[in-house]
Amino acid sequence: QVQLVESGGGLVQAGGSLRLSCAASGRTFSSYIMGWFRQAPGKEREIVAAISRSSSSTYYADSVKGRFTISRDNAKNTVYLQMNSLKPEDTAVYYCAASTAIAVVTSRARYAYWGQGTQVTVSS
């Protein structure tokens, strides 16, 4: 089992940047596929990005490609989401999640462990 704690959210103006961090407990962080999801008010939770165990493979939602970068540091048990050129439509609660899948997966159902979420608000 793994416990996840997100940080780094906040209020930023459109065009600005934020870096989210997700710290994981336990000694097996490197065995998990990690993902970032977000949920805006009144909308379904959607995947933003995901990364493989060794960082060799990544996935990005079309809406964030070229603006967001997911990375991980297995020595620090941490996954990051660098968010640049933020837009008001990026406003949401962002969640970190861990999956025991072998390869990168994008379905919420494949992620068994979730953080509590961190709010990101982008003002226009």
Image: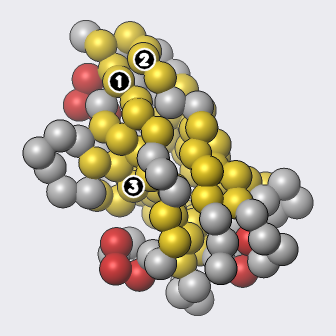
| Quarter where residue 110 is shown | bottom left
19 to the left or right of 28: left
Q: Which residue is mark 2?
A: 11
Give the color scheme: rainbow, by chain, secondary structure or one colour: secondary structure
Residue at 45%, 47% (x, y): give it: 117
Report if the CB atoms under discs 2 and 1 are less than 8 Å apart: yes
**Helix or strand or loop: what does disc 3 sit on?**
strand
Residue 58: give x, y in percent of width and height: 54, 64
21 to the left or right of 122: right
Is 18 drawn above or below residue 43 in the view shown?
above
Amino acid carrying mark 2 in the image: Leu
76 to the left or right of 33: right
Amino acid carrying mark 1 in the image: Thr
Q: Residue furthest right?
A: 75
What is the spatial separation of the Cα atoms under label 3 and label 1, in whole angstroms? 15 Å
Q: Which residue is mark 3?
A: 37
Residue at 69%, 65% (x, y): give it: 55
**Helix or strand or loop: what does disc 2 sit on?**
strand
Q: Which residue is mark 1?
A: 121
| Quarter where residue 91 is shown | top left
Residue 99: give x, y in percent of width and height: 53, 78
Is 100 drawn above or below residue 117 in the view shown?
below
Residue at 28%, 48% (x, y): give it: 39
What is the spatial separation of the Cα atoms under label 2 and label 3, in whole angstroms? 18 Å
Report crowding for label 2: few under 14, some 14 to 19, many 20 or more residues within 10 A (C-alpha). Answer: some
Amino acid carrying mark 3 in the image: Phe
Report crowding for label 3: few under 14, some 14 to 19, many 20 or more residues within 10 A (C-alpha). Answer: many
Residue 85: give x, y in percent of width and height: 42, 23
Given residues 35 and 104, the one toward you in this image is 35
Where, quadrant-wise, is the N terminus in this rendering?
A: bottom right
